[in-house]
Amino acid sequence: MRTIISGAIDDQALDQADLIGGITPTCFVTNGLWEPPFSVLPEKVYPVEIKLGRLGETARNYTLCQNADALILADDNPHLLRVAQQYGLVVFEA
């Protein structure tokens, strides 16, 4: 699954997401603000558009969700969570 990571995700969170949430990442999708845990899996980065100011990260959440199948959320990001649910992604809150 192409998996968005948001927050400080470690190996334990990945294991829990797989065991409890059924999320087995094949690729990490990020906005460049969070590093995925050490892995041989590819990472696709969609950087936040600085020119949009405060709306940059909000707008990027839509891009992330359009290019992913699942979300592992380890921080407080209600907008990303709401967009992921709107797009029907599998969500695991670490």
Image (spheres, rainbow, N blue to C red):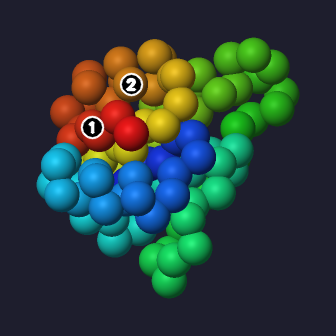
Which residue occupies the extreme bottom position in the image?
A: 40
In percent of the image, x 74 and y 35: which residue is there?
49
Q: Amino acid at mark 1?
A: Val
Q: Could you say where residue 91 lies in the image, as x and y percent from the top left?
A: 27, 37
SS for callout 1: strand
| Callouts 2 and 1 close, C-beta under 8 Å | yes
Q: CA distance from mark 2 to mark 1?
A: 8 Å
Lateral position of residue 23 relative to residue 56, left or right: left
| Sooner in the amino-acid sequence: mark 2 or mark 1 | 2
- Find residue 81 and report its horizontal and vertical position in percent: 38, 25
Query: Which one is nearer the viewer's eye here, 29 or 21?
Result: 21
Q: Which residue is mark 1?
A: 91
> Is 31 positioned to the left or the right of 9 in the image?
right
Q: Residues within 10 Å of mark 1 (few under 14, many from 20)?
A: many
The kind of residue tagged 2 is Leu
Q: Residue at x 19, y 47 (%)?
A: 21
Determine which residue is flagged by label 2. Answer: 81
Quarter of the image for the N terminus: give it: bottom left
Judge the density around disc 2: few (<14), some (14-19), many (≥20) Cα neighbours within 10 Å. Answer: many
